[in-house]
Image (cartoon, grey):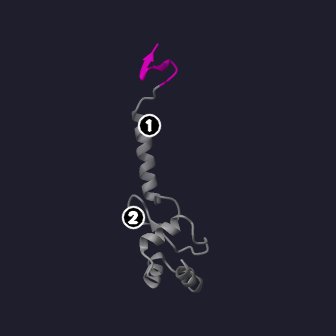
Amino acid sequence: MDRCSNYLWKHPSAHTRQLSDVTGTPMELLTDWVRAGKFPSTYSQLDYPCESCRSPIYVGRLCHSCLGTFRSAALDIQTRVPRRTTAALFSVAGRVKGY
């Protein structure tokens, strides 16, 4: 981590790939550190891959495109599946009974 910090101090606009190449730190380790917030936000070029499509992102787990896709799929499912009510149901020995 010290090598990374020293390099970033001298080159604050470095990207994650550049940092990995120069310091010899594995890319996976750097992306874990960036995701965990180990670097100050002043180093705004440090990115990591989206968990769905692997495009570079700077915050969260999904890129804007994948987030929109998942939201629209969730809304589609929500409109297709009827809601169940639990008002008249209770469980007896693992079985659900309705009255």
- What whole-number distance in Å separates the C-alpha atoms at marks 1 and 2? 27 Å
Q: Quadrant of residue 83?
A: top left
Indicate yes or no whether the magenta region holds residue 88. yes
Helix or strand or loop: what does disc 1 sit on? helix
Q: Are marks 1 and 2 in contact (CB under 8 Å)?
A: no
Helix or strand or loop: what does disc 2 sit on? loop
Q: Of residues 40 and 29, which is closer to you in this image?
A: 29
- Could you tell me residue 36's position as x and y percent? 54, 64
Q: Of residues 35 and 94, which is closer to you in this image?
A: 94
Indicate yes or no whether the magenta region holds residue 97. yes
The residue lying furthest to the front in this view is 93
- Could you tell me residue 47's position as x and y percent? 49, 70
Q: Amino acid at mark 2?
A: Arg
Q: Amino acid at mark 1?
A: Gln
Instruction: Using the image, determine if residue 38 lies above or below residue 6.
Output: above
Which residue matches tag 2? 54
Instruction: Using the image, determine if residue 70 lies above or below residue 2.
Output: above
Q: Which mark is residue 78?
A: 1
- Relative to 94, 14 lies left or right: right
Q: Which mark is residue 24?
A: none
Q: Earlier in the sequence, mark 1 or mark 2?
A: 2
Identify the residue shown where x is 41% and y is 51%: 69
Question: Which segment did they paint magenta?
Answer: 85-99
- Could you tell me residue 33's position as x and y percent? 51, 69
Crowding near the residue tagged with mark 2, few <14, some 14–19, many ≥20 C-alpha atoms within 10 Å: few
